[in-house]
Amino acid sequence: MKAIRYLLVAVLLGVAGTANAVGLQDDAPDFTLENLMGGNMRLEEYRGQVVLINFWASWCGPCRQEMPLLDRLHHRYEDTGFAVLGVNVEGEVAPAQGIVDKTNVTFPILIDEGQKVSDMYNLQAMPTTVVVDRDGVVRYIHPGYKPGDEAKYVEVVKKLIRE
């Protein structure tokens, strides 16, 4: 009976978490995370810019494949009021730093210690990409990655930069 109660609570919490999931046209939940380069970064500091937030993990093959493409996107549009933030969901510096050293990405990598931000964004897949407009509103969510998905990111980013 006790096990059934725990299962019921887990199911209800899961449903509640889904009900509170970040969706399109929602305000992007603000967060402050440690930057791999030192110090903290806060999403709110990017208000007025288009921001692509990429949630990733070092053990995720598609994440590693996507990172250099995101870095190119970052460099291509950073002068137009666009930024990429990589949020490592593992909560540990060493695995994230290892991947950054291998891929040579230059956009900020943030460490989600305790997965608090991942939980706020209710991640369902790895990687997950969220694009936030200049007003802090979620305008695009893409779970997973396969080659070619970056074309949609470019389309969304260009549209939001023009707004």
Image (cartoon, grey):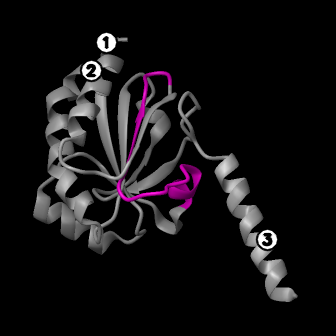
Q: Residues within 10 Å of mark 2 (few under 14, many from 20)?
A: some
Report the magenta residues as a range. 116-135
Q: In the image, what residue occupies the spot 58% across and 51% down?
A: 120
Q: How far, Cα to Cα, is label 1 from label 3?
A: 46 Å
Q: In the image, what residue occupies the spot 42% across and 22% down?
A: 48
Query: Dividing the image into 4 quarters, which one contains the N terminus?
Result: bottom right
Element class at badge 1:
helix
- Residue that numbered label 2 is attached to: 158
Q: In the image, what residue occupies the spot 14% across and 50% down?
A: 68
Image location (x, y in percent) of residue 94: 28, 74
Amino acid carrying mark 2 in the image: Lys
Element class at badge 3:
helix
The label number, if any, that marks residue 16 in the structure image: none
Amino acid carrying mark 3 in the image: Val
- Residue that numbered label 3 is attached to: 9
Asked if residue 121 lies left or right of residue 140, the reply is right
